[in-house]
Structure formats: structure tokens, C-alpha cells
Image (cartoon, rainbow, N blue to C red):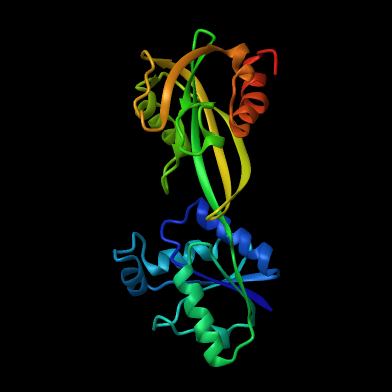
Amino acid sequence: MFTLIFGTFDRFHEGHRFFLDQAIKEGGGELVVSVALDDHVRTLKKKEPTESQQVRLGVVSAQPGVRRAVLSDEALGAYGILSTQRIRTIVVGYDQQGLWDDLQRFLARAHHSFRLVRLTTELVSVALFIPERDGWVFLQRRKDPRPEWNAFWEFPGGKIAKQEDPALAAARELTEETALDPLGQRFLGMHEFSMVLPEGNRLTRIYAYAGNTAGKGVCMETDTAADGRWFPKNELLKLPMLPPNKAIVRKLYLNCCGVQNLG
């Protein structure tokens, strides 16, 4: 018996891989993937698919853990795949509300008893840059309407766009937020943390980079940053930081810099 998921999978990225992994974990057993037809992408996404259905099908078929990938039924809302594959569980992504509602209606009308699972965790990928200069590091003081997140010191960074290279995203965020230019960068590692938010669960992956920079360093995005300042590396752990930033400093940054951990 198999677990079934549905998706477009246009330009396969980290979020798609996360979806597959979560479906395998929640559904158990081997995975069958229904890949949307080009016409369905145009209808659902209101745009032309970047890759053809055959390309998308081939990419998904090659993913670890996928037993079989098939193109979806010709008609939207038709689920003939349920009678052609040995499906036990159907897993729906956290952002597939329309599919979830339609499947519930279909299964109720057809009196099917498949196990239907809705994923509740969103994956967010973030790139972070630690700007360096002569033993000093630039941080910004966060401006946030949520008191529990406000006024903490943090490094320039933000969400990685789909298909964007994390290293390029880190350099882009650095320049956009501080007007500093990277003179080089090195990858420190990836840090994960989970949060339970009112809108659902979130798993955040932070790809951390560091490197020398040129420029004075200013807060370009004053709606999210109240202040910017250079600090000595050996004083970083004395600053009030949110736990993910402090973990990156302690576990990924100071050790690689040969700086004594004073926190």
C-alpha cells in the first residue's frame, strides 16, 4: 500500500523535497506522486509552467523515496488515480487548502475511506550574513511589533527566494539591509529551529555565511531595524539575541574564527 501526494513541482526546490520527506514520514510506506498537467498549472497558478509536465515528471521520478510518479487525471477534481494505484494514505501539503477541501468532498461523495493527512509545518529557508572587519562584526537591532521579538540584535538576512542560491541570497540581503558590500564569504553551516505560531508550525533553516565587507554599515530597512552597530567578535554572546542567532554565533561562528567562547 502506498502514500499519495499531489503537486506541480515546477523547478524542483528545497520546499518540494521537504514535502516529499514529510509525506513519507507521515504516510508511511512508499510514495506515489501525482504531477499536475501543464493545463492544470495554467488554471491553478494563473501562469505558464516554467518546465513541461514531462520534465517535471522526470525530476520527481528521480527523487529518493518516490516509488512512482504519474501525470494527474485529465480533469481537475477527478481522482481516477485512487482506483489505479494501491493507495492507503493521501497526504496534503500545508499550503494546499483548496486540494484539501476538494478531496474531503470527493471522498465523502464516493464513500471512500482513505486515510487523509494534512501537513501543518511550513519550511522557511533563510540566508544570513555575518559582516566582518578587523575583528569587528556588524549587527542590527530588530524592530518588531511583537514584544517577544523586538529590540534583539541580529545579523542581516532574510528569506531565500525559490531557486535562489543561498550564498547569493546572503550577499543580496547584506547589501539591501546595510549597504555593505561583501569582499568574500565563507559558509559556516546550516542551523534549524522550529516554532509554533498562531498560523501553524514553522521549520526554519538558516544558511549562515560570514566574510569581510566594505562600506560604513547603515540600516537601510528602517521599518525592521532600529539601529546598526559594529561590535568586537569576543563580545557577541554578551548581546541580547534571539536563540537562533545566539546558537549560530556559539556553534557555527566563534569556533571557526578561533575566538574564545565567552558566553
| Res. 64 in view | no
What x and y, as percent, mark residue 96?
Answer: 48, 67
Residue at x 51%, y 63% (from the top left corner): 60
| Res. 227 in view | yes
What x and y, as percent, mark residue 113?
Answer: 64, 86
In the image, 235 versus 112, the foreground residue is 235
In the image, 94 versus 150, the foreground residue is 150
What x and y, as percent, mark residue 249?
Answer: 62, 24
* Total numbered labels placed on residues in the image: 0
Residue 169, quarter of picture: top left
Q: Is residue 47 left or right of residue 187?
A: left
Q: Quadrant of the C terminus?
A: top right
Residue at x 41%, y 18% (from the top left corner): 183
Residue at x 44%, y 72% (from the top left corner): 98
Q: Is residue 232 left or right of residue 39?
A: right
Q: Quadrant of the N terminus?
A: bottom right
In the image, 133 versus 142, the foreground residue is 142
Above or below — where is 115 with respect to 58?
below
Residue 24, quarter of picture: bottom right
Above or below — where is 181 with respect to 147?
above
Residue at x 62%, y 64% (from the top left corner): 23
What x and y, as percent, mark residue 121?
Answer: 58, 56
Q: Is residue 75 left or right of residue 246?
A: left
In the image, 76 versus 225, the foreground residue is 225
